[in-house]
Amino acid sequence: MSTAHDFLLRETRRQFLGRSGTGLGLAALSQLLGSGQAAAAPPAPTSPLQVRPHHPARAKHAIYLFQNGAPTHVDLFDYKPELLKRHGKPLPDSYIGGKRFSTMTGKADGKLMLAPVEPFRQHGQSGAWVSDFLPHTGRIADELCFVKSMHTDAVNHAPAISLMLSGAQIPGRPTLGAWLTYGLGSETDNLPAFAVMTSVSKGTSCGQIFYDFYWGSGFLPSRYQGVKFRGGNEPVLYLSNPAGLPSATRRSMLDDLGALNQLKFEAHGDPEIATRIAQYEMAFRMQTSVPELADLSKEPESVLALYGPSVREPGTFAYNCLMARRLIERGVRCVQVMHAGWDQHNSLTTELYTQCRDTDQPSAGLVIDLKQRGLLDETVVVWGGEFGRTPFIQGNLDDRKRWGRDHHPYAFTSWMAGGGVRPGISYGQTDDLGMNAVHNPVHVHDFQATLLHQMGIHHERLTYRFQGRDFRLTDVHGKVIREILQDS
Amino acid sequence: MLTELQRLLRVWTTVWTTVWIVAGATIALGQNPPSTQAPIRFSREILPLLSDSCFACHGPDEKARKGGLRLDTLTGARGSGKSGKIAVNAGSPDQSEILRRILSSDPDEVMPPPESGKSLKPEQVALLRRWVTQGAPWGRHWAFEPPQRPTIPVVPGVSHPIDALVRSTLASDGLQPAPEAARSTLIRRWSLDLTGLPPTPAEVDAFVADPSPQANERQVDRLLASPRFGERMAWEWMEAARYADSNGYQGDGERTMWPWRDWVTDAFNRNLPYDQFTLWQIAGDRLPGATDEQRLATGFLRNHAINGEGGRIAEENRIDYLFDQTETVATVWLGATFNCTRCHDHKFDPYTQKDYFGLMSFFNQTSVDGSGGNPRTPPLLPVLNRELRTRVDDAQRGLSHFIRDTEALEQKRFHPEAGQSLDQTPLAQDFSAAHREHLKVPAANRDAGRLQKMTTLWRDFDPEYVAVLERQRASRIHWDTVQSQIPQVMVMEDLPKPRTTHQLVRGSYENRGPEVLASLPGHLTPGHRVARPDRLELAQWLVSPTNPLPARVTVNRLWQQFFGVGLVKTSEDFGLQGERPSHPELLDWLAIEFVESGWDVKALVRSIVMSGTYRQSSQSSPENRERDPENRRLSRGPRFRMSSPMIRDMALASAGLLTERLGGTAVNPYQPPGVWEETTFGNKRYTQDHGEALYRRSLYVFWRRIIGPTLFFDVANRQTCTVKTPRTNVPLHALLTLNDTGYVEAARVLAQQVLASESRDSERLVQIFQKILGRRPRPAESQILLEGLRRHRATYAHQPELATQWIRTGEHPTPSSLNPVELAAWTVTTSTVLNLDEALTKE
């Protein structure tokens, strides 16, 4: 027995160090450890920064509340009195300047401005403007950092989401969660380090799809890929034993399997066999830890109430927000909660209400819950979509029921909370119509660089060599927005 | 025992997943410190160093070039940049600016600059110095030089050139070759590698007992001749070709490209030479007198995703498709990372952005305009298999028959004169304009809708005519139905007038740069001019003996298939940043043999798997393993976990469930409910198939591009070309083979067979081992499993209702004659064997 163990440790460590020394992948490690330390290092972790991050991390966990479909910044966060004034008037040419829009808009010339659908008011000591669409978010405004000058390169959903989550418009690059788990490793043996949950409001007409490349690991080893947690009885695919197989029998069968594999290992010596033994044991641990994770019976009513009425319903955004907290409590590194249906081409006065109702309270509830538990300091929460929506109307001004806004990559708002991000501030500004990010613009790659920074990662130094090139999340761009960080 | 194991496992958990990364380590062997006199091998020792440390700013990419200095060409390196100081002064290291800057302690001067995060190790600097001292000899990157036939070293007792080339390096690395694998191991290895399926117990017995010196050849030839060979070989090709049964993206419409997949299988089975295989897929439509089959092959290029998302700009889509085609061809035949050249000249390899668009121009000639998400976007080729052909012919015969009936009756009724259409006949004038309008159309040209209208119009006038028309209509509807079932394969076909291609600034479709003529990569075809963008010329170059890359890239991929790692580990990148071959002479020998054999794939495969190197045992002494942890020196036989589709096929075959029918439409086997529905908000509903469709080989499983089959892992995502897939071991994989209905069913059906055929437990176990592992259990293994069996029996005897549930997993019938408790217990035991490391592994 101990032979197998020693052998595995020796092999693993040597191979790991050998590999990191050659620069094929875990390149950062030897540099971070320093050679003397490396020689005396305990069994090497699988991730380059697990031993020592690039700089002290402010956050250990990340929760990305991804709002798929692009929430309308001018109706929710970016208050523009000028837009009210110009309601129904054409968009001034000076704002267009060769911009491209989706084919639904085509040319923006002559488009009519559309005032925010609901009134805005200021909240808290920070005085942040938040629309009446989001009363719960308004109430926690002092916890939030609104980045109002976000902008992106893509005008369509899949490429823009891909850019936001993986740094590239074309599918197939590793996503933020994959980079984080590759860089920082896992703090749990029982659960995947990167978990993903998706939801959509009932009755939403949107056709967006949750492509699995939104949580893919790209060219990183597939163990860094996000694991999809589903609502319902089987949160992870193939987790449950088939009907008629008692748990004790599974355990007993795995004991035999382990013993047989151990015999094989002793006879053959291939360390892959020891890996196999560990793999099956971890599968069993997942079988027990995931149902415990999904058991909400010990959550106090007061906590459940924070997330709103649908929190008990698996598969809702509220349920997923609560699960996000439970996951990071159990050591999961990154949780990506995606909610679709924000694509208000013709539903600003209809489905947008549903979207906000389903997401507003759970998002705020999550932040409050984390804060109450003292987890907000070590968890960075992000809320936002892939682009904004046009300050001008899509549809007919006379047909209020069908008011809409088209895709708008030139300006949008995301918010962050916790994890060392300065609370109660707004950063960056758009022009007086919310068309363009004009002051302190924040590109997607800047946003990503900042997120990584809070997790203790220098975005230019967490790289992976693929096809002869060292790739990173931020491609060849990105600048940390120090102004929004507490420690800068 | 397990408690201790569990304790250890906790320690391992941060460690265990690293083990697979062994594929990442490089060889530290055989690198004795070279003497100062040893001649420097430029392309092996210096070029990779320059590439890695200098080319990003002083390489092929003109726009990124700093200080006007380039170090990737002889002229550049021997010259000087803006500073006017000679970079590499041959023979005079102290007068070489490059060395002065590398050694500088001034942070503003030192190279590479600190912000690049790169630095040279002292031994690398020493190497550069020696190179300059020796006169700075120059040369090209190895992969761009033509392969050289190596001298086969004489190694006593070794006859196969592969073995001579491998073994001659083993000794210098302090390694001993492993002995030949046991015959039962060897036949399982061959069967899995060549057919993707385990050997039957009878096949194992026959081979083990075959005393003939030709036993090995016989086995290999038998397997190569099996139709399963083509199915097995098709998988990797489908991954490279990003084959899927749907478009991808929003809408994700279902396409009918499967005849192309069947063509691939068939091409491997009849051993279509690889040069033809290439010509047909790149330019089958351009071949003189192109056959339907040759045109079908060009579906390779059309397997890319199609984006039907609302609001997408068509031209942006169209350019994306061209990018995909260009990069796929570059990866598969050139091992070139062309995606780097989309926006700028390659940073490391001598490919320019102009090369990229010159190559793209060949594909930029079809009628595809990028609009919409039609999964049957022309150019199309209808493809009929024999069964469909019969049905089409029958339908056509039926329709023709009824058209003739109609025509006969119309002659009788209307008496048209020669050249007169029915609506012009005197009788027709007695009826309405509507009547006449339909009569104007000849009987043979009337579709079902028109026939319907006609029957209504004539109902009150001529019952006999109506009856004839109705029969024609019914047969026309049948004909339509059959026609709609003909798969339409998207293929290549050029527009009559060539389309101009523009270089796109930073690869952006809306930012057109100068016009670019079709061209082949300049550094590989100096002085060559392409007259017009004809894919045939491109294809011919891809299999031209003057092209140093395709044969090497191809034999390397095949080597990777059998050994788990290519001789060049970066099988997707043969450029300067790719890994150098572990056995350069062997790679060249294989490439040259391949071309000289007439690109004979089966002969190449045969040569590899007949080699002693391949036939070695995968077991090795701890010392050998220590020195060669990844087996890159090939001091033992290959041993690695099979791909997930192969594992599934193995399980089905062991249970005797596998359907052996070749080809056809894709199938939907067991999948947990709701997977497609959740992803697509109910727009795509998964309808599981039944019967034999559940047991078809993995390559026939329907591949929805936006959400691939859940029963595979570590497979290509079928979004873009993939020639190397990862091999990881995560708990989710174990959950799949433990809990998926199909795997449990396979265990149960195999248990049913042994219960029916054998009464002694120990003998039943022998049969299970033989079917799954191709060998008998050892006593210690039997003991563990039979003890387990007793526990499972006791459990199910106490809870027979659980037994009944458990043995109903899967749709294959459970014979009522079998005792449910017995079957349930044996199913657990069989599932244990199916999940053994050895079962999941090709050893």
Image (tube, helix red, strand yellow):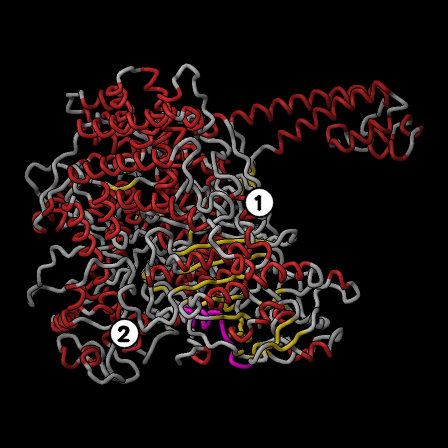
What stretch of residues is rendered in magenta?
A: A438-452
Is disc 1 placed on a helix, strand or loop?
Answer: loop
Q: Is B635 left or right of B664, judged from the image as shown?
A: left
Q: Which mark is residue A123?
A: none
Separation of residues labelled 2 and 1 (CA atoms): 52 Å
Type of amino acid at the residue the image marks with label 2: Gly
- Where residue A165 appears, x then y in whole percent? 46, 62
Residue A255 sits in quarter: top left
Q: Which residue is mark 1?
A: B253
Q: Is residue B284 above or below residue B187?
A: below
- Where residue A48 appears, x then y in whole percent? 28, 63
Residue at 30% in and 55% down: B574
Which image quadrant: the N terminus of chain B?
Answer: top left
Magenta includes B236?
A: no
Asked whether the residues under marks 2 and 1 belong to the same chain, the reply is yes
Cβ–Cβ below 8 Å for labels 2 and 1? no
Q: Which residue is mark 2?
A: B76
Earlier in the chain: of badge 2 and badge 1, it is: 2
Considering depth in this image, is B112 or B546 the residue closer to the camera?
B112
